[in-house]
Image (tube, coloured by chain):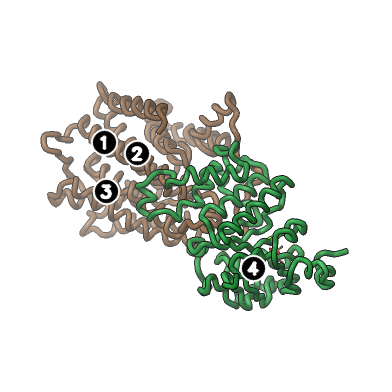
Amino acid sequence: MTPKNIIFAIVAVGLLIIAPLGQGNYITYVLCSWLLFSIAAMGLNLTLGYAGQVSLAQASFMGIGAYITALMTLNGIHWILAMPCAVAATFFVGLVLGYPALRVQHHFLAFVTLAFNTLVFLAFRNEEWLTGGSFGLVGMPRPDFWVFSTMKQLPFYYFTLVCFLISAAAFWWIVHSPWGRAFKALRENPIRANSVGVDTRRMTLLAFAIGSAFGGLAGALMTPLVQFIEPGSFALVHSLKLLLMVVVGGAGFFFGPILGAAIVILMPEVLRFTEGYYLIIYALLVIVLMVYSPTGLMGLGGKVITRFRPQREVRKDMVQGAQL
Amino acid sequence: MSETILSVRNVSKNFGGIQAVREVSFDVKRGEVLGLIGPNGSGKSTLFNCVLGQLKPSSGEVHVNGRNVAGMRACDLNKLGVGRTFQQLSVFPQMSVIDNIILAGQEHHGTMLSRLFGPSDAGLTAEAEQMIAFFRLSHLRDELAGSLSYGQQKLVDAAMAFMAGPSLVLLDEPAGGVNLTMLGNLKERLKTYNESHDTTFVVIEHNMEFVMSLCSRIVVLAEGAIIAEGTPDEIRNNQQVIDAYLGG
Ligand SMILES: Nc1ncnc2c1ncn2[C@@H]1O[C@H](COP(=O)(O)OP(=O)(O)O)[C@@H](O)[C@H]1O
Ligand SMILES: [Mg+2]
């Protein structure tokens, strides 16, 4: 980390600490929801943005994490024990979902993961004995940590913030480690990566597993935040929403999904005054952004900076992968 | 000099109706620099890909250090000490030059866990910098590899093949698009490596000057089959080769 990065990180954390002060319960709730969706979107960013593997199943991992946490905490097990179970379970399910990615890519992979999300949704809805079916599960407690109770909205925000900061640090570490380099290599040119010793099969599976585990953690936070979960919260449309967060924010950028989650979660609040036109305006903004800057808001920021300080760009005339 | 490091035995490869490689057999001894030449479409790249686990031969066997490597994945072959370059540009365009080179070495250092928890450069920055200095790319250290010119990207590609200290390197048209000075430099690097590390090379190249002065032995392919094999002098004077490839 450069000194500039450290100062930026301190300022950002400071802002996150003071953000909910003096705000009502609802705003604090929206902020919590932003942080936890950021965690899930960060995971998807690893799978999609860094490793280049399309996934339309991130919401189902949030769901698996949320249901595991709900069932365990309803049975009197503390959140601090339930959460690791949720993370571990989603890690392994994610690993299994990675197998199709070894065979198919791009839109075919999108369909496989889409089918998986639907399957998980149906399991939540139909296995009433376990999940409560369409009625879902209610009354999950918020965790106490000795004297620190997260019952109230503000303490819960700080609890979520701590989880968010740990996730962000872990994510930062992963993408800056040799693993991160191997993930990017997988996205850029898998054949070349394989020929310089990157075990592309293992890295593909790991990209899914780790990305899904972030989703599992987000789910583990959603359960005590909402205290009511139902299958509809983890349907395909929510996976698309997470995809939107990553793409709008900027896939493959550290801050992309955090920014994207802010837009997707906060935009409805900001555009509330437009009433029925909200979705139309929203869709238009996304289309304009994608046309002008396919790399999302982070890419847009980059474009503005290059206006003033021209940098080198990848040459479009010579980008061709290793052909056999 | 007598130990066989690479042995290709009766390798054939069909793409549907096209027989790209037909019953090709040859041996490469440790420390040798073998040239592989032939007209475009004669199956040279396909043969490389069969040797390197990128394609599965339709029939035949490939042995590296006496070990049958049929069906072995490219990454495992690379860990056995086999490096390569591709005919087409194949760098990682959105990564910096130094990251490209570090990547090519990192999987040979430490364990899976040390690559997650250890230093972000896997301790390879100094070594990678030496490598790019040798290829005279130091001024481009932090540029995106995809922003480099064609010749520069070819050099990054070659540098990657050397990064893991391989004992056998297969180069597919390394000189294409590389300027004359750099070409001499590349030849010198191959020679140095060959002498100091006893590294074995198989080189596909259309630049005859480059092939003739570098290689100790040459195999000529035409329409997927070997039509001649011998020293540069023998090849230069072989009538069949002149007809099929060198031309008048
Ligand atoms: N993946 C492929 N699918 C179908 N045909 C191929 C493929 N790769 C190579 N070929 C064919 O095999 C033949 C040999 O190609 P190649 O090995 O690239 O030749 P060279 O490298 O000697 O120029 C050509 O006729 C080419 O069209
Ligand atoms: Mg070729």
The residue pinned by badge 1 equals: A162
C-beta proximity under 8 Å, tags 4 and 1? no
Letter of the brown chain: A
Task: Establish if A248 lies above or below A21.
Answer: below
Mark 4 lies within 8 Å of ligand 1 (Cβ measured): yes
The residue pinned by badge 2 equals: A168
CA–CA distance between discs 3 and 4?
52 Å
State the SS at label 4: helix
The residue pinned by badge 3 equals: A66
Residue drawn 32% across the image and 57% down it: A92
Task: Establish if B207 lies above or below A301.
Answer: below
CA–CA distance between discs 3 and 2?
20 Å
Q: Residues within 10 Å of mark 2 (few under 14, many from 20)?
A: some
Q: Quadrant of the C terminus of chain A?
A: bottom right
Q: Quadrant of the N terminus of chain A?
A: top left
- Asked if one can make out residue A37 in the rendered structure from this viewpoint, the answer is no
Q: Which mark is residue A226?
A: none
Mark 1: amino acid: Val
The residue pinned by badge 4 equals: B47
C-beta proximity under 8 Å, tags 1 and 3? no
Mark 4: amino acid: Leu
Residue drawn 41% across the image and 57% down it: A205
Instruction: Pinpoint the chain carrying mark 3.
Output: A
Residue drawn 33% across the image and 46% down it: A214
CA–CA distance between discs 1 and 2?
10 Å
**Mark 3 or 4, closer to the camera:** 4
Residue drawn 62% across the image and 62% down it: B201
Mark 2: amino acid: Ala
Residue at the left extreme? A147
State the SS at label 3: helix
